[in-house]
């Protein structure tokens, strides 16, 4: 009996001692500042090589932390990408959340909720999980946290939000207790369209120095459109810079994991809403002096943005949810040799409802250093949306691609020499399989699927993709409910005759 009493009294002391020694004890848990732009491709930061854009905040985080050269979103569309980030899961595992303008069912655990459960202060400003409706999924609050939106400012140009994202972060910090860890989502609406036409030139950008991706016509109109986009990228970066200043003034910068990234690529043809690099490869820099060994490194390992959820949880001493199929990055932080980080996987289901009956363009891709392989499940559908505006919820032709001067020019001159091929790549039909040699064809313009000499490469990548989809239980491969074409669409419907088809047999 005395032995049992001794053990009962001694056990709490042991647990306390272990907790104090643990680097992830409650008082040692890192803070998290997650900064995410809207529609920004990998190339468009100073650290990643763009000659014109000014991104001192991203460049600082990269210089003092890690800069990733092969970071990819899980889906090149806002809602699904953000759902994957929050849940640490591939979009094909998330039911309705695999579509934009949908919902994120409450049964899917998020890293924010798990951190909140252990005492973290959670909040967001600007664009958190969006766009869609949370109530149908059983949620009453944005999974990014409590909204901070009181502060506003006068934007420099039309099309920019008047939200003072950095000011709202400062308000959030005022609500964080001295002994409390925090996790904040700073999400800007920039660089989502629309842009203020001519803003790039107005800020002094030299159009002759604009780097025009090979998939776009190279003329002054397109260069100006890209310059306008870069102005919005800079606006996002300025907010990150101010947020860093807030942390520094409070003495919290060194103990905070700072992530700077984007949900997917730039809002241009063959970029956003496509699996190609301009749509899926994103900037990513992470700074955490207390947890990153040998900062200043360039990380060439492949990561998906869904890997952030288990990373945040593991860095906080928590075990990721069993639902999460993504992989934490603490091995990268520790500068350990990594295994099986040689590919990223990207997916797409329904984007903006621009095909008859609300049908999507389901596709999956695997991206390695050497190749990109894409499998299109429904190649008889228009990948960028139907040319017939009357079957599009947005009531515009090729409605999966946002309206823009670049898009309009490519449509208007689609029969002109030098433009026709590019217009076909952006708006035309695609075969079931696509294969691109990244070194020879960095913008994925020459499909090698079926080409002589590439048969073995195509076969191996097809099997690699299928194996990953099987392992992670993609219902399009392993069977099960495949309802992405029939889930409700909660976006704005500008075409009064448009509606989602009912699933066959649903009336019974």
Image: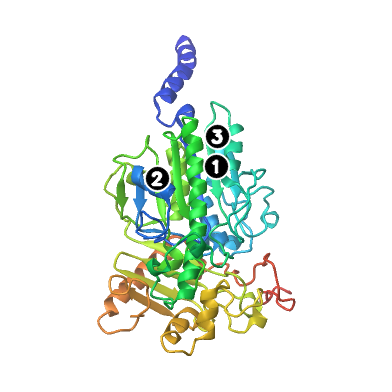
Q: Are marks 1 and 3 in contact (CB under 8 Å)?
A: no
Q: Is residue 115 visible?
A: yes
Residue ID for mark 2: 61
Mark 2 or 1: the one toward you: 2
* Kind of element beneath mark 1: strand
Q: Which residue is mark 3?
A: 118
The answer to which of 186 and 106 lies nearer the viewer is 186
Specify the quadrant of the image occupied by residue 480.
bottom right
Q: Residues within 10 Å of mark 2 (few under 14, many from 20)?
A: many
Q: Secondary structure at mark 2?
A: helix
Q: Where residue 323 appears, x then y in whole percent?
A: 51, 51
Residue 443 in the image, given as x and y percentages of width and height: 37, 72
Relative horizontal placement of residue 321, taking residue 438 as reference (left or right)? right
If you read the primary sequence from the N terminus, does the residue marked by circle 3 or circle 2 appear first? Answer: 2
**Residue at image coords 36%, 80%:** 447
Question: Which residue is denoted by mark 1 in the rendering?
Answer: 184
Q: Is residue 497 left or right of residue 473?
A: right
Q: CA distance from mark 2 to mark 1?
A: 17 Å
Nearest the viewer among 460 and 44 is: 44
Residue 265 position in % (x across, y down)? 47, 64
């Amino acid at each position: 009996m005395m032995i049992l009493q001794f053990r009962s009294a001694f056990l709490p002391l042991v647990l306390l001692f272990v907790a104090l020694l643990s680097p992830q004890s409650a008082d040692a848990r890192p803070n998290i500042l997650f900064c995410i732009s809207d529609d920004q491709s990998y190339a468009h930061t100073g650290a990643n090589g763009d000659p014109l854009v000014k991104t001192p905040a991203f460049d600082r985080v990269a210089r003092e932390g890690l800069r990733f050269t092969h970071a990819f979103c899980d889906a090149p569309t806002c809602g699904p990408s953000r759902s994957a980030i929050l849940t640490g899961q591939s979009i094909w595992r998330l039911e309705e959340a695999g579509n934009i303008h949908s919902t994120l069912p409450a049964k899917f655990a998020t890293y924010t909720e798990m951190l909140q459960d252990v005492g973290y202060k959670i909040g967001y400003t600007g664009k958190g999980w969006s766009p869609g409706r949370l109530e149908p999924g059983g949620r009453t609050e944005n999974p990014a946290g409590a909204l901070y939106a009181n502060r506003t400012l006068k934007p420099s140009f039309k099309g920019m939000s008047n939200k003072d994202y950095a000011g709202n972060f400062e308000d959030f910090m005022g609500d964080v207790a001295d002994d409390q860890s925090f996790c904040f989502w700073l999400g800007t609406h920039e660089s989502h369209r629309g842009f203020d036409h001519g803003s790039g030139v107005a800020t002094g950008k030299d159009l002759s120095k604009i780097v025009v991706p090979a998939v776009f016509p190279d003329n002054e109109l397109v260069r100006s459109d890209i310059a306008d986009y870069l102005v919005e990228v800079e606006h996002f970066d300025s907010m990150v810079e101010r947020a860093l200043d807030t942390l520094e003034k409070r003495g919290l910068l060194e103990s905070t994991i700072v992530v700077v990234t984007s949900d997917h690529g730039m809002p241009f043809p063959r970029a956003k809403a496509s699996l190609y690099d301009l749509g899926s490869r994103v900037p990513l820099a992470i700074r955490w002096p207390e947890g990153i060994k040998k900062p200043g490194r360039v990380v060439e390992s492949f990561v998906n943005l869904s890997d952030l959820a288990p990373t945040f949880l593991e860095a906080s001493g928590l075990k990721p949810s069993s639902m999460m199929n993504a992989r934490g990055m603490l091995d990268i932080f520790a500068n350990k040799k990594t295994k099986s980080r040689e590919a990223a996987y990207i997916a797409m289901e329904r984007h903006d409802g621009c095909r008859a009956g609300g049908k999507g363009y389901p596709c999956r891709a695997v991206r390695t250093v050497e190749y990109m392989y894409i499998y299109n499940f429904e190649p008889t559908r228009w990948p960028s949306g139907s040319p017939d505006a009357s079957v599009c919820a947005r009531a515009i032709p090729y409605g999966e691609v946002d309206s823009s001067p670049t898009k309009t020019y490519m449509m208007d001159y689609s029969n002109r020499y030098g433009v026709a091929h590019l217009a076909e790549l952006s708006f035309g039909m695609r075969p079931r399989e696509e294969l691109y040699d990244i070194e020879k064809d960095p913008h994925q313009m020459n499909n090698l699927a079926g080409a002589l000499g590439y048969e073995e490469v195509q076969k191996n990548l097809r099997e690699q993709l299928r194996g990953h989809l099987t392992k992670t239980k993609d219902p399009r491969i392993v069977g099960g409910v495949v309802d992405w074409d029939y889930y409700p669409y909660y976006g704005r419907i500008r075409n009064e005759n448009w509606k989602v088809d009912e699933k066959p047999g649903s009336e019974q």
